[in-house]
Image (cartoon, rainbow, N blue to C red):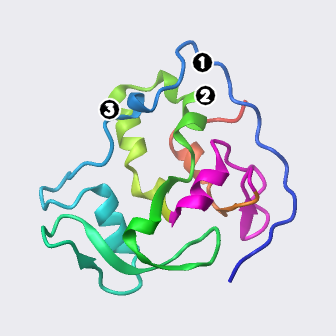
Amino acid sequence: MHRTCAPVAQAPELASPATPYTRAAFGTGWVDSDGDCLDTRAELLADLSTVPVTLAPSGCSVRHGRWIAPYTGQVVTEAGDLDIDHIVPLRYAWGHGADRWSAAKRARFALDPVNLLPVTASANRSTGCRPIKDSAASMCCGSGGSPRPMGWRSRPRKNGIWWR
């Protein structure tokens, strides 16, 4: 089911931290923290698939499953058609307090499954780096008209990111 969203208030502008944002400040990307050869992305896809996943021959990546893309309602069966979205975008976090965190805390935040969501690639790229403040509806729109899930506002508070 595709939801259309009513216009919502824009999130505040990014603050201007002393150090410019770089994605590398949040770590090197997906890691295999438990040594089973499945990295964070693969584990998230396996956990959130509505059917058992099919792994690649190496056993280290997910090929197929069944996911319902939360921003579009589209059913996706090919893992390669999905991006993993940071519900609170890393650039946004940087401008709202993460620039003052330790490198280890930023890396943990970037890989926190509570802040990660498999979405279609096009929907992910349309949301940009701004979460939406209005969470009155069950879904709320991102900057490109793509919704962000209700409850995203609790994620910044959990991690010490505050609205300016």
Specify which label sits upstream in the sequence, 1 or 3.
1
Specify which label sits upstream in the sequence, 2 or 1.
1
Quadrant in which the N terminus is drawn: bottom right
Query: What type is the residue that disc 1 sits on?
Result: Pro
Query: What type is the residue that disc 2 sits on?
Result: Gly
**Mark 1 lies on residue:** 17
* Residue at x 49% of width, y 54% of height: 115
* Residue at x 16% of width, y 56% of height: 34
For label 1, the SS is: loop
**Residue 117 image offset from top left, x and y in percent:** 49, 62
* Residue at x 25% of width, y 48% of height: 31
- Verify CB contact (< 8 Å) between mark 2 and mark 1: yes
- Marker disc for residue 95: 2
Task: Determine whether, in the image, residue 31 is placed left or right of residue 27.
Answer: left
Q: What is the magenta range?
A: 119-144
Query: What type is the residue that disc 3 sits on?
Result: Ala
**Mark 3 lies on residue:** 104
Q: Nearer the viewer, residue 28 or 94?
A: 28
Quadrant in which the C terminus is drawn: top right
Is residue 62 something that shows in the picture?
yes
Specify which label sits upstream in the sequence, 3 or 2.
2
**Residue 75 image offset from top left, x and y in percent:** 53, 81
In magenta stretch: residue 121 = yes
For label 3, the SS is: helix
Mark 2 → mark 1, Cα distance in angstroms = 6 Å
